[in-house]
Amino acid sequence: MRVQLKLSRDVRWSVRDTARRSDRYDGDPDLVARDENGEVYIVRYEAVNAMLLNEFLKEHRRVEEQRAYFELKLAQQQKQIEALTATIQKVSDQVALSRPAPQLVANH
């Protein structure tokens, strides 16, 4: 059965807001209340709010974990770049020292 919401005039979500049942409902059964015949008659918005908050907190934790991972990887890459730069500088210095010094030739 599908649930269509019929909100009160002040458009605040509350338990008083009712749901009108049509032919199917695909949502979480914990988010609706049913009458004695098993028909959906109300949407439990306090449960929706709690569910949304939990989902937000889970996603926030996941994002924070990713941020920490990326910061760690960035620091590791920065150290690698510094080590490679130092190695390149040493090699450049060795190449410069191994070259023969320029000879001055006097023209008489």
Image: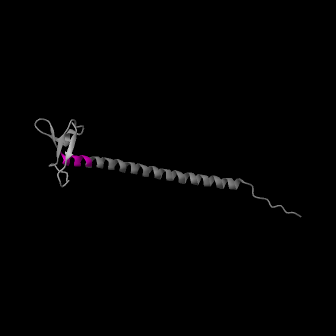
Measured as percent of width and height from the top left, residue 20 is found at 17, 42
What is the count of numbered marks?
0
Residue occupying the point 61% across, 55% down: 89
In the rendered image of this protein, does residue 25 appear above or below residue 94? above
Q: Residue furthest bottom?
A: 108
- Compare residues 105 and 54 and report the one nearer the observer: 54
Residue occupying the point 21% across, 41% down: 3
In the rendered image of this protein, does residue 29 appear above or below residue 15? above
Q: Magenta segment, which residues? A: 43-52
Measured as percent of width and height from the top left, residue 27 is found at 24, 39
Left or right, 86 with reference to 31: right
Placement of the C terminus among the 4 image quadrants:
bottom right
- Compare residues 97 and 70 and report the one nearer the observer: 70
Magenta-drawn stretch contains 58:
no
- Compare residues 29 and 81 and report the one nearer the observer: 29
Left or right, 73 with reference to 29: right
Placement of the N terminus among the 4 image quadrants:
top left
Magenta-drawn stretch contains 45:
yes
The colour scheme used here is one colour
Residue occupying the point 83% across, 61% down: 105
Measured as percent of width and height from the top left, residue 26 is found at 24, 37
Q: Residue furthest left?
A: 36
Left or right, 18 with reference to 92: left
Measured as percent of width and height from the top left, residue 41 is found at 15, 41
Principal SS element in the magenta part?
Answer: helix
- Compare residues 4 and 105 and report the one nearer the observer: 4
